[in-house]
Image (cartoon, coloured by chain):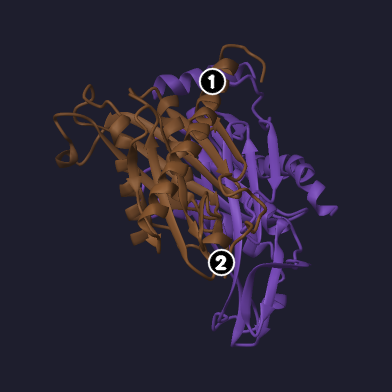
């Protein structure tokens, strides 16, 4: 099956509509909402705070702990059972690794920065949306950061290399590769890379470059969300 | 904590609370429907800064042996660690279980859903209605907000298509759930000799006793007393009156959807 045109009419290098907001959860030290198409992620950051049980503490520097969860009613199909699954645990772990390179936690030995990611509505790309939201929320919380991280999925559907696959594209009847990637803004280097499906090497390289280009736009959206929050707090108009 | 409580009481003596409200005032109530497109029904409820989401998933199951000709209902609550520094990740703790059970009892005992109509084949097949509540921000009174979100999500629900007893998720019919009475939960706190509704977190940390009164138009359908202190019958009478009276204001916010 060929894929000459995307099912939802987007260009191959075009993401779905993106919306980002910072500071949406007042109780949290930092928070954000990130929406890409129909996928919505909330992230809340608490910390640095004391970490118990004590044996988890790292005396050299603070640690980051991510908890990713889909809300039970968020999925297209059946109810998602609440509580950790193998999938959610793995995503939590790779999200930690994706964010870690930009964090400076040396000043917080023995402490933890908790990041909670929850998705009320999903249509593929959830870990990437979660990473984008978490990155904004960490900055909003004032955690010392060297840079921002953003993530998007790239891949191929049939012979087309493309960005931001939605659910229908992931389920395309033919050759598909889905490659979530996270990038550190200034270096352009990857802090998350996963792949499943089938892809040739040159397609992969093209896809990753396409992702890098796309993420430049997403970094701007993240920064805008942060600026808007602080603009409003300083008495500016919404 | 003692100091906090005496501050709260000092305020109440002047008919005032930390956020400027009177003892029996709600914060700004906001009900938004259809906030998750993959759920069969969903809603967001805000009481001031408190925010709760609820979503409905429908599936096919077997009726319970004691109600072979009825559908089944399940309520679960996630007091998400996202919503408060006091909540921890992990399986539901007693606070989440109590909240879910109080919400469940209100909906069940008010006979909100006509469960007979949710039976597909007696003793064999029925609809299972799963209500999930997830807290987003805890600025106090999660329980009343959760009960309202659950009810609003039920009102938002459309039945999915059924083909050979297999649910066709994503293909919703125009049919709503068979709904009857609408239970509204109002938690009344007793702090010193004062009564307060829609508590803030500070008030929830300083009360003596509380009573959640869930009512339909005329009747009480569920109650839950909480806190370490005791209540007199006189207190309870006053608290039930307050609960029924304050529920009316919430009903106005729900009415919009009823018209559809």
Out of A67 and A177, give the one closest to the viewer.
A177
Classify mark 2: residues with Cα within 10 Å, few (<14), some (14-19) or many (20+): some
Residue that carries the numbered disc 1 in the rendered image: A227
Residue under the image location 38 percent in, 37 percent down: A183
| Residue depicted at x 68% and y 78% | B162
Residue A115 located left or right of residue B19: left
Q: Which residue is mark 2?
A: A77
User: Which image quarter holds the N terminus of chain B?
Assistant: top left
Query: Which chain is assigned brown?
Result: A
Q: Position of residue A145 (x, y in %)?
A: 34, 24
The residue nearer to you, when weighing A199 against B34, is A199
Give the secondary structure at mark 1.
helix
Residue A207 visible in the current orientation: yes
Image coordinates of residue B172 in percent, x first then y, are 71, 67
Residue A93 higher or lower than A136, as above or below: below
**In the image, residue B206 lies at what x, y percent?**
46, 30
Q: Split into 4 quadrants, where in the image is the C terminus of chain B?
A: bottom right
Nearer to us of marks 1 and 2 is 1
Q: Nearer the viewer, residue A48 or A20?
A: A20
Chain B tint in image: purple
């Amino acid at each position: 099956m060929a894929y000459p045109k995307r099912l939802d009419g987007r260009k191959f290098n075009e993401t779905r509509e993106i919306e980002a907001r910072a500071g949406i959860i007042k109780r949290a030290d930092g928070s954000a909402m990130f929406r890409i198409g129909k996928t919505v992620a909330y992230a809340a950051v608490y910390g640095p705070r004391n970490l118990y049980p004590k044996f988890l503490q790292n005396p050299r520097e603070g640690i980051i702990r991510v908890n990713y969860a889909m809300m039970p009613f968020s999925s297209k199909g059946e109810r998602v059972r609440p509580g950790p699954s193998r999938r959610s645990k793995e995503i939590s772990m790779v999200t930690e690794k994706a964010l870690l390179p930009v964090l400076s936690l040396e000043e917080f030995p023995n402490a933890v920065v908790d990041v909670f990611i929850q998705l009320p509505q999903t249509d593929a790309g959830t870990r990437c949306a979660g990473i984008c939201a978490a990155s904004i929320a960490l900055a909003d919380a004032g955690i010392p950061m060297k840079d921002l991280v953003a993530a998007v999925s790239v891949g191929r559907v049939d012979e087309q290399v493309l960005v931001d696959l939605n659910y229908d594209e992931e389920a395309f009847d033919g050759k598909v590769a889905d490659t979530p990637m996270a990038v550190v803004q200034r270096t352009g280097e990857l802090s998350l890379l996963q792949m499943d499906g089938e892809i040739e090497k040159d397609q992969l390289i093209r896809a990753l470059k396409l992702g890098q280009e796309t993420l430049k736009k997403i970094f701007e959206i993240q920064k805008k969300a942060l600026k808007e929050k602080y603009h409003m707090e300083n008495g500016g108009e919404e | 904590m003692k100091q906090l409580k005496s501050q709260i009481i000092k305020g109440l003596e002047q008919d005032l609370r930390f956020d400027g409200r009177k003892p029996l005032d709600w914060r700004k109530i906001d009900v938004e429907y259809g906030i998750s497109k993959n759920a069969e029904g969903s809603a967001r409820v805000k009481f001031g800064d408190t925010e709760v989401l609820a979503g409905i998933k429908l599936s096919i199951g077997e009726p319970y042996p004691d109600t072979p000709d009825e559908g089944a209902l399940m309520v679960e609550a996630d007091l998400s660690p996202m919503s408060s520094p006091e909540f921890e990740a992990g399986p539901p703790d007693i606070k989440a279980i109590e909240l879910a059970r109080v919400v469940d009892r209100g909906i069940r005992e008010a006979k909100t859903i006509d469960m007979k109509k949710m039976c597909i084949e007696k003793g064999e097949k029925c609809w299972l209605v799963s209500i999930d509540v997830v807290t987003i921000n805890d600025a106090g009174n999660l329980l009343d907000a959760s009960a309202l979100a659950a009810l609003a999500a039920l009102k938002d629900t459309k039945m999915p298509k059924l083909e050979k007893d297999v649910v066709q998720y994503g293909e919703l019919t125009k049919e709503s759930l068979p709904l009857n009475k609408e239970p509204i939960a109002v938690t009344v706190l007793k702090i010193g000799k004062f009564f307060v509704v829609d508590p803030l977190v500070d008030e929830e940390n300083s009360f003596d006793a509380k009573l959640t009164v869930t009512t339909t138009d005329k009747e009480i359908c569920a109650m839950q007393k909480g806190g370490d202190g005791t209540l007199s019958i006189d207190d309870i009478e006053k608290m039930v009156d307050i609960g029924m009276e304050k529920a009316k204001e919430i009903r106005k916010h729900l009415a919009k959807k009823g018209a559809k």
